[in-house]
Amino acid sequence: MNIYFWFSLAWGVLAVLLFLWDCLEEDSSDRSSNYYSPEEQALAEYLEKKQAINEIYLKAHAELLKSYKR
Protein backbone atom coordinates (compact mmCIF):
# COMPACT_ATOMS: atom_id res chain seq x y z
CA MET A 1 0.00 0.00 0.00
CA ASN A 2 1.29 3.40 -0.83
CA ILE A 3 1.19 6.65 1.09
CA TYR A 4 -1.57 8.18 -1.05
CA PHE A 5 -3.99 5.49 0.09
CA TRP A 6 -3.34 6.35 3.74
CA PHE A 7 -3.69 10.08 3.08
CA SER A 8 -6.99 9.61 1.26
CA LEU A 9 -8.23 7.29 4.01
CA ALA A 10 -7.30 9.83 6.70
CA TRP A 11 -9.04 12.66 4.81
CA GLY A 12 -12.13 10.51 4.35
CA VAL A 13 -12.32 9.68 8.04
CA LEU A 14 -11.76 13.33 8.92
CA ALA A 15 -14.53 14.43 6.55
CA VAL A 16 -16.99 11.93 8.07
CA LEU A 17 -16.12 13.04 11.61
CA LEU A 18 -16.57 16.72 10.71
CA PHE A 19 -19.90 15.97 9.07
CA LEU A 20 -21.15 14.10 12.14
CA TRP A 21 -19.93 16.85 14.46
CA ASP A 22 -21.71 19.47 12.37
CA CYS A 23 -24.96 17.49 12.42
CA LEU A 24 -24.82 17.08 16.20
CA GLU A 25 -24.08 20.77 16.72
CA GLU A 26 -27.09 21.81 14.57
CA ASP A 27 -29.37 19.53 16.61
CA SER A 28 -28.31 21.10 19.89
CA SER A 29 -28.78 24.64 18.56
CA ASP A 30 -32.26 23.74 17.26
CA ARG A 31 -33.32 22.58 20.71
CA SER A 32 -32.25 25.82 22.34
CA SER A 33 -33.92 27.98 19.68
CA ASN A 34 -37.33 26.35 20.25
CA TYR A 35 -37.74 28.19 23.54
CA TYR A 36 -39.41 31.58 23.33
CA SER A 37 -40.01 33.95 26.19
CA PRO A 38 -43.60 34.89 27.10
CA GLU A 39 -42.99 38.37 25.69
CA GLU A 40 -41.94 36.93 22.34
CA GLN A 41 -44.98 34.63 22.29
CA ALA A 42 -47.30 37.54 23.09
CA LEU A 43 -45.69 39.64 20.36
CA ALA A 44 -46.10 36.83 17.82
CA GLU A 45 -49.79 36.44 18.73
CA TYR A 46 -50.32 40.20 18.47
CA LEU A 47 -48.66 40.38 15.07
CA GLU A 48 -50.69 37.43 13.76
CA LYS A 49 -53.94 39.08 14.88
CA LYS A 50 -52.88 42.41 13.39
CA GLN A 51 -52.06 40.75 10.08
CA ALA A 52 -55.44 39.00 10.02
CA ILE A 53 -57.24 42.28 10.72
CA ASN A 54 -55.25 44.04 7.99
CA GLU A 55 -56.14 41.34 5.47
CA ILE A 56 -59.84 41.67 6.33
CA TYR A 57 -59.60 45.45 6.02
CA LEU A 58 -57.90 45.25 2.62
CA LYS A 59 -60.53 42.84 1.30
CA ALA A 60 -63.34 45.10 2.52
CA HIS A 61 -61.65 48.15 1.04
CA ALA A 62 -61.27 46.43 -2.32
CA GLU A 63 -64.96 45.50 -2.31
CA LEU A 64 -65.89 49.10 -1.51
CA LEU A 65 -63.81 50.35 -4.41
CA LYS A 66 -65.47 47.85 -6.72
CA SER A 67 -68.93 48.99 -5.62
CA TYR A 68 -68.04 52.67 -6.14
CA LYS A 69 -66.83 52.00 -9.68
CA ARG A 70 -70.16 50.47 -10.69
Image (tube, grey):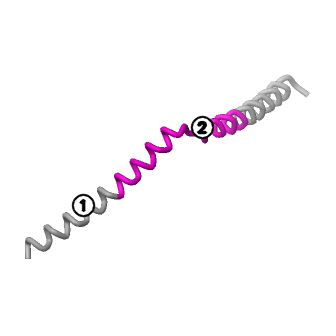
What is the residue that sits farthest to the right in this orientation? Answer: 1
- Looking at the rendered structure, the secondary structure element under dot 2 is helix
- Looking at the rendered structure, the secondary structure element under dot 1 is helix
Q: Is residue 43 above or below residue 62?
A: above
Question: Badge 2: few (under 14), some or many (20 or more) residues near its Cα, within 10 Å?
Answer: few
Which contiguous range is marked in magenta? Answer: 23-52
Asked if residue 37 is among those painted magenta in the image, a careful observer would answer yes
> Nearest the camera: 10 or 35?
35
For the image shown, how many numbered marks are present on the structure?
2
* Sequence-earlier tag: 2 or 1: 2
- The image quadrant of residue 34 is top right
Horizontal relation, residue 35 to residue 52: left or right: right
**Residue at 13% across, 67% down:** 65
At which x and y percent is residue 25?
A: 69, 33
> Nearest the camera: 64 or 3?
64
Q: Which residue is mark 1?
A: 58
Say which quadrant the C terminus sits in. bottom left
At which x and y percent is residue 5?
A: 84, 29
Residue type marked 1: Leu
**Residue at 8% across, 72% down:** 69
Horizontal relation, residue 58 to residue 51: left or right: left
What is the residue that sits farthest to the bottom in this orientation? Answer: 70
Which disc is residue 33 wearing? 2
**Residue at 46% across, 44% down:** 42
At which x and y percent is residue 21?
A: 74, 32
**Residue at 19% across, 66% down:** 62
- The image quadrant of residue 64 is bottom left
Horizontal relation, residue 44 to residue 20: left or right: left
Residue type marked 2: Ser
Question: What is the C-alpha distance between the residues marked 2 and 1?
Answer: 34 Å
